[in-house]
Amino acid sequence: MARLILVGPPGSGKGTQAEKICQASSIAHISTGNMLREEIASKSELGKKVESVLASGKLVSDEIVIELIQERVKKPDCKNGFLLDGFPRTETQADALDALLSKSGIPITHVIELQVDEEDLVQRLLNRAKIEGRADDTEEVIRKRLEVFHAQTKPVIDHYRKLSGVFHSIDGAGSVDEVFKKIEEKLR
Ligand code: AMP
């Protein structure tokens, strides 16, 4: 049973690859970004609380996303495995995930890092803005999200990097299918 964490900066293709991986291996796709956007779209209390945070490119509080994850991994579609996309993003979230998984006796099987050159990331995100029209895909907010990534999420990835046999770094520069093929090789 695969339990994956997909890590990488904003614009590295995590969401796209996550969908392909989950479809191919019938595991649940858990994206905290998608969950938060759904809360905003449905105008829930939580959605109202986090809307301006997403629009600014900053991170929602650890407490909120940890609770979302704790509830989400209990759902029946996670029994077959799951892929975390966009979580954990801080050391506190990584610690909470460790505690949650060790309590349930279900360790992470793969951490996959997508590596993409910084200027390519900005271009990719600006292109995505034209297609998807996400509120946080303006150049100013993109730069903020990259800054947040370096300050808060990079140390988490470097922590996972030490897990030999579990951590795999992949060049995310190619086409969607090329990158997916490289990921599949690691999952085999
Ligand atoms: P994403 O779609 O993963 O790029 O996430 C979009 C936005 O949602 C981020 O810029 C944050 O504001 C928020 N977000 C998503 N996941 C997390 C997380 N694990 N911790 C804190 N904020 C998050």
Image (spheres, rainbow, N blue to C red):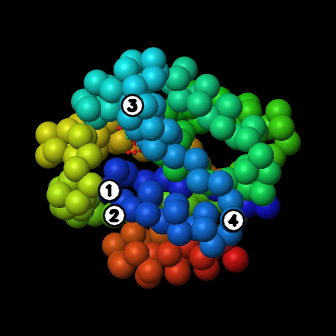
Local SS, label 1 = loop
- Return the residue at label 4: 26
Mark closer to the chain start, 4 or 1: 1
Q: Residues within 10 Å of mark 4 (few under 14, many from 20)?
A: some
Q: Is residue 2 left or right of residue 62?
A: right
Circles 3 and 1 in contact, beta carbons < 8 Å: no
Circles 4 and 2 in contact, beta carbons < 8 Å: no
In this view, the mark in front (3 or 4): 3
Q: What residue sits 59% from the left and 30% below the top? A: 68
The quarter of the picture where residue 54 lies is top left
**Rendered view: 50 above or below 175:** above
Local SS, label 3 = helix
**Where residue 157 sits in the image (x, y, percent)?**
50, 47
In this view, the mark in front (3 or 1): 3
Local SS, label 4 = loop
In this view, the mark in front (2 or 3): 3
**Where residue 55 sits in the image (x, y, percent)?**
26, 32
| Quadrant in which the N terminus is drawn | bottom right
**Rendered view: 72 above or below 110:** above
**Where residue 95 sits in the image (x, y, percent)?**
63, 31
Mark closer to the chain start, 3 or 1: 1
Q: CA distance from mark 3 to mark 1?
A: 21 Å
Q: What residue sits 83% from the left and 38% below the top? A: 104
Disc marking residue 11 = 1
- Return the residue at label 2: 116
Q: Is residue 75 left or right of residue 119?
A: right
Which kind of residue does numbered mark 2 sit on?
A: Val
